[in-house]
Every structure is written in structure tokens, then in C-alpha cells.
Image (cartoon, rainbow, N blue to C red):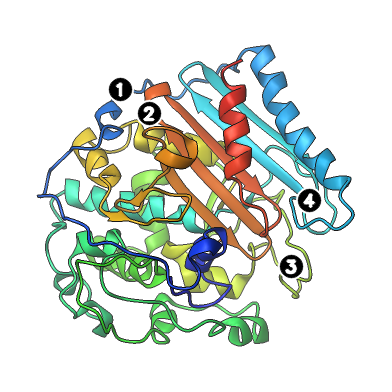
Amino acid sequence: MASGSRWRSGLAVAVLLAVAATGCTKRAATTPPSGSATSSSASQAGMFPAPPTNPLPSATVTALQAVLDKIVADNASLPDTTTAAGLTAAVVSDRGIWAGAAGQDGVGMRLRPETVLAIAGITNTFTAAEVMHLVATGQVKLDDPMSAYVKHPLAANGATVRETLSMRSGLSDPAEGTFDKPFLAQPHRHWTMTETLSYTPKSSRAPGGMSEYADTNFLLLGLLIEAVSHKSAAAALRADLIDPAGLTRTAVQDTERPVPPVAVPKHDEVPATFDGYVPLHSAVSALVTAGGIAADAADVARWGYSLYGGLLLEPSLVAQMTQPLATQPNTPYTAYGLGTMQFSEALGPDSLGHTGQAPGFSSLLVVVPERREAVAVLIADSNTGPLSVARKLVAALGT
């Protein structure tokens, strides 16, 4: 798996999937016909009721908070820990809602349930959903070439919109370390997606057959969104998805600035003056639709519940998002759909969502359609994989 640098959201996945870091095994994937809906998880879409406002039962709330408290306490007892300094989490289910926090951020501030953290790669679920919204409105066709919508050299290799959404475009990210110096040299500088893409090499592989996680795909999809909607990516996401989903503490950086409280990354992760963007102004403006969103855990869980529960898109479109297209052996996710990871082996049958990692932060959104549950885990430490936290929270939901 190629990654541009530690500042790119794709590297987030590469770090979490370190077992595959030396050229992960890839398999050919078969593209389903447009409109196919064979994913069993997608068969549950459209069956979720509106997100509730009542809290989960008190015993469940106690059990969920105990998971977070124990993780922080256990980590504090380790002499040389690389695990979480602090974390927030949230649940939205048809039985009720919960949000909690434990520990501190990278500079010792106590985390609160409403603290905003970087969600990195979970941004892909928003970008994919916006593309599917454009499909629903007849403005985009999944099996059209990207070049029909995006006038950029990287979009001229014949890859379709569907192949780009599923990381099968044949494109890679820039070489490791490409962005470290420019991002740190001017940490408060605004980048454009086009500037970021100028560092990306042309594809040496034909699209369609092989899967490689690359942020380049979702930056190109950001350009598609802007070209078709005639809005900035941030404005399109807010109008079509963020506001309709009722997300009040979500920011598409750097067009939008997160509303405090905001978690600050460790200084050894992001050695720059904190200006309210997480993890770093230059990095998030460069990523935008490939990793630029920040949110609190409650918003992330509500987003997952609404999206994969069929409350924002037609169930047939959600089914296409969750259809596994690209298999990735030896990784926490079983397969990649359209901006969506399948976690069947790691978190149980039909569980889906996305991971994220950025300097100072790691995150996970997981939705279990059969149980009508969405769980978000946001961690103030980029070295911690949130999958084990999510497993414990899902188990606690059974209490």
C-alpha cells in the first residue's frame, strides 16, 4: 500500500494496517452492474428509524463509560506507553444514544464528550455519499469515466467514478515523506486540492483490477463534486449531507473551522502553533475530501447511523456503497466498497464503516446494520488502533 506521507489520510490506514505496509496483497475485484445490491448489510438499509434523542438504559451507559475509563487507567499504568492518552466515543442505536470521554488530549486538556477531533479517513464516507447524492440527482453516473467530470491529467487514465470510489483507479499517492517539509515549513498556509495532486505521479497501472488505498482518489472525487455542484466541496457536503443529517459539531476544514472544545495533538506529532485546525492547517486544507473533516464522536455516530441506515440516500445507493469490491487480505477490513470498509472479520458479520488516522489522532466509525447500531471511537493518539475499543463498546451494548 503506497502512502504519500504521514500527513495523508491514506497513510492513516497504512499505519493501522501495518501488517500490509510492505506491499499489501491485492486481488482482482469484479465490478457489479450499476444498481446491483447484493450486500447483505445493505439489505438492512432504509430500515432504521430516525435517530432517537433518549439515552440508552443506565446500566448500558455505565458499562460503556467503564470501557473508556479502564482503557485510560490501564494505559496510565504502563511505563512506556504508545497507547491512548485519551479518547471519546459515542453510540447511536434505535434503543437510544450515548456519548462519553476519558483522559486528555495531546497537551493535557481533559477531553469532553463534545470535544472535536480529526476523523481523517472517515471523511471518505462523506465524500462517497456526496458522489452518490449526485448520482441520485442524475448529475453523475458511476460507470462514466472520471474525465467526463474532472479535467485533470490524473483523471485521464480511463478510470470510472466507481473505480475511483473503490480505490481501483490505478492511481497511487506520492512517495513517503513528500509533504512533511512543506506542511511544517508553512503550517498555517492554505493548500488547494489541485496543488496537492500536483505531487502525485501518473498511473502506471490500468484501472479496474487491483486495489490500492490512495488519497489521490478522493481528492479527484472532491474536484468532481466541485465541478458538478458548482460549489466548494465543503459547501456541497454541508448543504446535501451535514445539515440534513443534523450534525452540529462537524467541520469541513479549512473552509470551516471546528467549534471548541477541540483536541490539540501532541507537540511531537504536530510541532506547530495550534490555530484551531486539527491536526494541522496546511494538512487539512490539502486533504479536504480525503481526510479534512473534524467532528465530535456523537456527530460521527449519528452520521454513520443516518448514512448506512438509509436515512440520507436511497437504500439502493447505500447498497452499492456497501457492496464489497476490493478485497484486502491481512488487514482489519475485509473489503472496500465505495468509500466504505467492511469489518466482517474484525467486528462481526456485516459491520461496516471506515477507519482514520492522522498525526495525533486515530478514529473508527462502525455500523452494525443488523443491530441498528453505530459506534464512533475518536482517540487522541495516532499510535492506537481503535478496533479493540470498538469491540469492547459493541460488547457493552449487549448489557
Q: Nearer the viewer, residue 41 or 125?
A: 41
Residue under the point 39% across and 84% down: 200
The answer to whether the residue labelled 2 contacts the one labelled 1, judged by CB atoms less than 8 Å apart, is yes
Q: Which of pointers 4 and 1 lies earlier in the amino acid sequence?
A: 1
Residue 302 seen in render: yes
Q: Nearer the viewer, residue 16 or 150?
A: 16
- The disc label shown at residue 252, or none: none
Cα gap from disc 4 to disc 2, whole angstroms: 31 Å
Mark identifier at residue 47: 1
Distance in Å between CA atoms under marks 2 and 1: 9 Å
Badge 1 marks a residue whose secondary structure is loop
The residue carrying mark 2 is 369
Label 4 residue SS: loop
Report the residue at 46% width, 65% height from top: 288
Position of residue 299 relative to residue 105, above or below, is above
Q: Secondary structure at mark 3?
A: loop
Q: Nearer the viewer, mark 1 or mark 3?
A: 1
User: What's the mark number on residue 85?
Assistant: 4
